[in-house]
Image (spheres, rainbow, N blue to C red):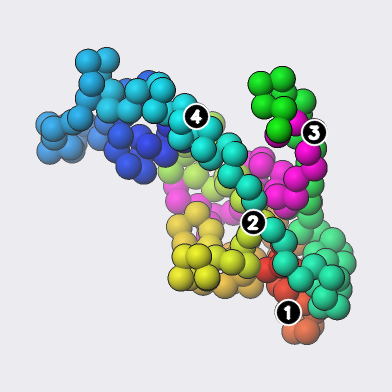
Amino acid sequence: MTVAGAFANDLGISNPLFKSQPCTSAQESCLSAATGNNKNGVELNQAQLNLVVDFNRNLAPLKARDLDSKNAIEGRELFYKTGCNQCHNPSFKTQKSERLPHLSNQTIWPYSDFLLHDLGSKLSDNRPDFKASGSEWRTPPLWGIGLRDKVNGSQALLHDGRASTIEEAILWHGGEAKSIKNSFIELDKNDREKLIVFVKSI
């Protein structure tokens, strides 16, 4: 569903799960634009979609770095002390799968609960999506976040890229995460930096 939704809504490519173009009724040029639809009325067929899903499913997560440094160890303690782990849940065990034995029963460390949380009006885009309100966001995994600069050329954090640093992203948290943000603010500068060193090492 995620890959099919990204094809449709991010790239405008119709597929078996999202057959129509993501145009509003007011977007006449979008509605009348040429498509690359096949005989089944979609641009991407099920076999092609399955290939992309399988590719994404089998990507290895980025490896954690420098977790045993003094600052990262102390930062990890502060991550728990402030309550960041309440939503950024460290680990899960994958389910057993006869079809995907190589992905079965593995401990993964995404630092996410993958749930929706209301983060307050300042982060709201006022655009409900399915059952999520405009201020509810799925907790993003933190693994690999310390490499975003190297890979993407910038941090561009949060749903719309408004935060240019991890600290800035934390400070945008409100709603359910407001007390955790406040706990972070109450740390002294050195401790805040240690917590960020830990997050960057995940």
Can the viewer see residue 71? Answer: yes
Is mark 1 in CB contact (under 8 Å) with mark 3?
no
User: In this figure, which residue is indicated by the disc labeled 4?
Assistant: 1
Residue type for callout 1: Glu
User: In this figure, which residue is indicated by the disc labeled 2?
Assistant: 62
The span from disc 3 to disc 2 (Cα, nearest Å) is: 19 Å
The span from disc 1 to disc 2 (Cα, nearest Å) is: 22 Å
Q: Judge by depth and name the residue closer to the eye, 43 or 26.
A: 43
Tag of residue 193: 1
User: In this figure, which residue is indicated by the disc labeled 3?
Assistant: 105
Residue at 22 percent of width and 25 percent of height = 37
Binning the other alpha carbons within 10 Å of mark 3 as few (below 14), some (14 to 19) or many (20 upward) gives few
Q: Judge by depth and name the residue closer to the eye, 162 or 47.
A: 47
Residue at 59 percent of width and 39 percent of height = 58
Quarter-of-image position of residue 169: bottom right
Residue type for callout 2: Leu
Instruction: Name the front one of labels 1 and 3.
Output: 3
The span from disc 1 to disc 3 (Cα, nearest Å) is: 34 Å
Q: Is residue 29 above or below residue 154?
A: above
Instruction: Name the front one of labels 4 and 1.
Output: 4
Q: Is mark 3 on a helix, strand or loop?
A: loop
